[in-house]
Amino acid sequence: MTASSDSGELFRLEISNRAPADWDSLLSRDPAAEYTHTKYWTEAVCTNLPDARAVWLSVRRSGILVGGMSAVERVGASRMKGLVPGRRRTESNLEGTTGGPLVAGDLDSSGQDHVFEHLVDGYAGRSLGPLGTCAMVLGPTQEVRFGPLMLNRQGWVRKDAATAAVSLEGGIEQVEKSRLVRTKRNERNRGLRRGVEVFPTDDVDLLREYYGIYERASRHWGVEPSPLALLESLLRDGDGRVFFICVRFEGKVIGGHLNLHYGGRILAWNGVTDPALSRSHFPATLCFWGDLVEACRRQADWLDMGGSGGVGSLVGFKKYFGAELQMRGIYLRESQGTRILRKGRDLWRSRPGIASPARWHDVVSGSESGESP
């Protein structure tokens, strides 16, 4: 597929099941790129999720890669319990992460717009089938830059998706002094005095011990946990871009966060702590503190604590670390059959007597005291 920009430049769109050989070059030229734009992420996901296959879109001008987009396609896939047979979902994001197009930053503004639109239209052009969905999530920087262009793209529906991010400007001393509230400093200090350890590691055995806590939390959330093999594969990223913050007490892992690092942004992606100790040893506070310390050591600009799934107490908890809300954009393009199913599901969930989303810690410990002021 080819198209011309307003200046007459010719762009060619290609779709493949393999990443272009020069993908890393494009990645380094987009200042908004995140870890989930890397080849390693997409290939790890497709290796470790059942029936997943990669879709790679690329745009070239005079043979030079100037834009690209990766997606994961699955048939019959659903993170929620209650699988719908035959459902086909193609996502340029996964499990609370971002995705969407990469666009070379050395193009002029109009060229960037054209490449972005060319990629989105090529992505939307994939056959949805009777129960199909195309999805992508633009990160905060992408959403500011390219979100307005999505207003003109037919068939896409947008939803807000706030993420909580802490600025790391000034390093860990400045973060502690001006962003971490006093109660969180006190909780951190009390946990450490009581013998809790918090440290970064790439030890897969510690990740495996953590996984049992994560499985229990997933049962409460009503979702299928990400496969342990996927988490292990990510932690083995040979470029050192993934690290696990481990929280341990008396030799036993009581929580952790698997963090994804690319450029100036670190995403605390997969994480949970044991709620049984939440009001005595503050593992959640120590986990986020460990994220901040390591993120500052790596000289990142932002620690992205992710979304909160509509759980108000979790939104508030993150604000006590100095997090500000930054807006992502979720974009969906659905077949008519999928829209009908989704509306039915939403009506079922909104029926009287159905509780609002609850944080695992809120349910198990009975209150949030000890994890927030």
Image (cartoon, grey):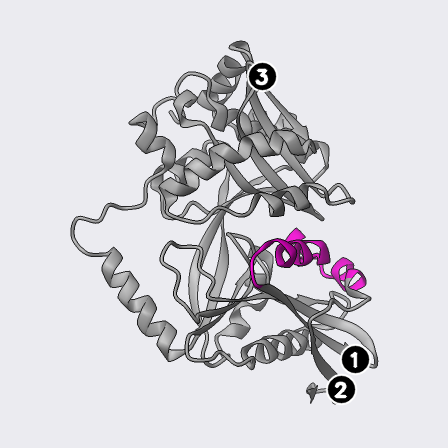
Image-quadrant location for residue 160: bottom left
**Residue 42 part of the magenta segment:** yes
**Residue 164 image offset from top left, x and y in percent:** 50, 44
Q: Looking at the image, can residue 24 be seen?
A: yes
**Residue 127 image offset from top left, x and y in percent:** 53, 81
Q: Residue at x 19, y 56 (%)?
A: 351
3 lies above or below 282: below
Number of residues whose C-alpha sits closer than 10 Å to that of mark 2, classed few (under 14), some (14–19) or many (20 or more): few
Toward the viewer: 172 or 87? 87
Q: Which label lies toward us, 3 or 1?
A: 3
As measured in the structure, the alpha-carbon distance from the residue carrying label 3 to the one carrying label 1 is 56 Å
Task: Label 3, secondary structure: give it.
Answer: loop
Q: Main secondary structure of the magenta part?
A: helix
Q: Which residue is mark 2?
A: 10
Earlier-in-chain disc, 3 versus 1: 1
The amino acid beneath tag 1 is Arg
Q: Which residue is mark 3?
A: 251
Task: Label 1, secondary structure: give it.
Answer: strand
Magenta residues span: 24-51
Can you say which quadrant of the picture contains the C terminus?
top left
CB atoms of marks 1 and 2 within 8 Å: yes
